[in-house]
Amino acid sequence: MTQKTLFNSFDKQLLQTLPRIVFEGRIIVVQSENEANRAVDFLMRQPILGFDTETRPTFRPGPMNQVALLQVSTHDTCFLFRLNMIGLPDSVLRLLTDTEVTKVGLSLQDDFNQLSRRRRFRPGTFIDIQSMVRSMGIEDQSLQRIYANVFGQKISKGQQLSNWEAGTLTEPQKRYAATDAWACIQLYEELTRLQETGFTLEVVNKEK
């Protein structure tokens, strides 16, 4: 069987030509503490979870806004916790500090630092995709480039700078947020498989 070829750095122009991938599963918006309790009970029974956050951008110098959204996904269901509405309740804190369920994200220390502004906690069991790809010789650190490298598909970033504290999230916002969390599971499982079965790393000149 031919080994999959990965690149140490994925070409930015090639990225724009790739087919778009979006999460097509169930999305549940959580905006009360009771809803958070039920969501966490469900998530704690899963074998693996994808993890991400969103923050309303600031377009002028000054302090950053607090994390507005926490996305936690299974293979087919993603919960969007609206932290700007519910804060960081005990149930969500239980999920963040849990050491039993594997949780996968990207640039996790940044997420932890921002979440800790709402309520301090010690993170439980998490795996950072950036650490995985670095150990494999891949230099790219963004979710979009890593996903393109591994799967040949593009994650759109069109909603990244939208208002994550809006009264109601739009469908594109929900799909974007869910896709980022879900993609972390897909990457973890495929990267783990490639580490076990082998892959070819093609070294290309980095962009100037």
Image: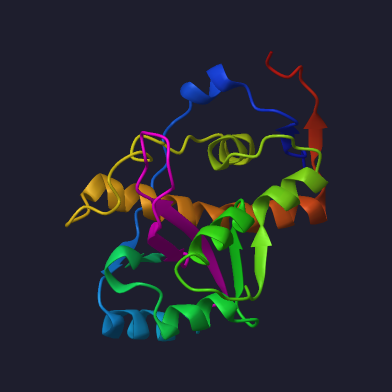
Q: Quadrant of residue 41?
A: bottom left
Give me the residue at 70% from left, 28% from top: 9
Q: Among all residues in the image, which is located at the extreme left? A: 167
Q: Left of 20 or right of it: where is 115?
A: right
Q: Left of 118 or right of it: where is 131?
A: right
Give me the residue at 36% from left, 47% from top: 176
Task: Tell me where residue 165 appears, x and y as whole percent.
Answer: 26, 54
Residue 23 visible at all: no
Task: Tell me where residue 169 appears, x and y as whole percent.
Answer: 22, 54
Q: Quadrant of the N terminus?
A: top right
- How many numbered markers are drawn? 0
Range shown magenta: 46-75
Q: Among all residues in the image, which is located at the extreme top? A: 208
The magenta stretch spans residue 67: yes
Task: Tell me where residue 79 appears, x and y as whole percent.
Answer: 36, 68
Toward the viewer: 25 or 101?
A: 101
Task: Tell me where residue 201 appears, x and y as whole percent.
Answer: 80, 33
Question: How does the figure colour the protein chain or chains?
Answer: rainbow
Q: Left of 138 or right of it: where is 18?
A: left
Can you say whether 6 is above or below 174 in the image?
Answer: above
Residue 67 visible at all: yes
Give me the residue at 49% from left, 57% from top: 52
The magenta stretch spans residue 58: yes
Give me the residue at 65% from left, 27% from top: 10
Q: Left of 43 or right of it: where is 5?
A: right
Q: Quadrant of residue 184?
A: bottom right
Toward the viewer: 156 or 109?
A: 109
Can you say whether 12 is above or below 47 in the image?
Answer: above
